[in-house]
Image: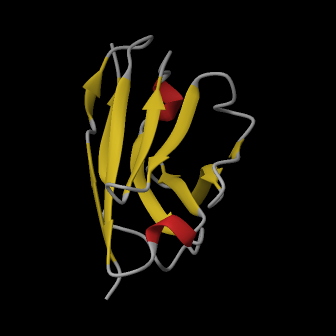
């Protein structure tokens, strides 16, 4: 059974930073592409970042240059470093196996506010 457990969210002021983690189990993590998705209040799911099994990273235009995705295959853990946070980054952040919107964890809340 695929399990994805996100952590690291919180409340932060604009310009602040957070590091999200996603602990994965139940599948061959090292061979899977992984994504971070987010859902802001009243909006649909948005793909934030993708990392391939080989470690290549892609970012949405709204987070490019501010967020950084990485993975530790030995720990079956996915990360997202969030820097220079803005109020519009407020959302529930989910990790996803194979970037499948249906195969995502419960999420961790990020709130950016002054």
Q: Position of residue 47 (x, y in %)?
A: 62, 54
Q: Position of residue 64 (x, y in %)?
A: 69, 29
Q: Residue at x 38, y 19 (%)?
A: 17
Find residue 73 and report its image quarter: bottom left
Quadrant in which the C terminus appears: top left
In percent of width and height, residue 44 lies at 57, 61
Residue 44 in view, yes or no: no
Where is 29 relative to 61, above or below? below
Rendered image quadrant of residue 63? top right
Residue placed furthest toward the bottom: 1
Write the residue at 50% across / 65% down: 30
Front residue (pair 109, 25)? 25
Quarter of image, res 80: top left
- Report the quarter where the N terminus lies: bottom left
Tell me if 19 is positioned left or right of 15 in this view. Answer: left
Query: Residue shown at 45%/76% (left/top)?
Result: 28
């Amino acid at each position: 059974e695929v399990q994805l457990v996100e952590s690291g969210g919180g409340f932060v002021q604009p310009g602040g930073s957070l590091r999200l983690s996603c602990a994965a189990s139940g599948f061959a993590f090292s061979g899977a592409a992984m994504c971070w998705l987010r859902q802001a209040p009243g909006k649909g799911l948005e793909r934030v970042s993708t990392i391939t099994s080989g470690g290549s990273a892609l970012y949405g235009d709204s987070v490019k240059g501010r967020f950084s995705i990485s993975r530790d295959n030995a720990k079956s853990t996915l990360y997202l470093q969030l820097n220079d946070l803005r109020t519009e980054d407020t959302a529930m952040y989910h990790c996803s196996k194979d970037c499948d919107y249906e195969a995502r964890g419960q999420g961790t809340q990020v709130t950016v506010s002054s």
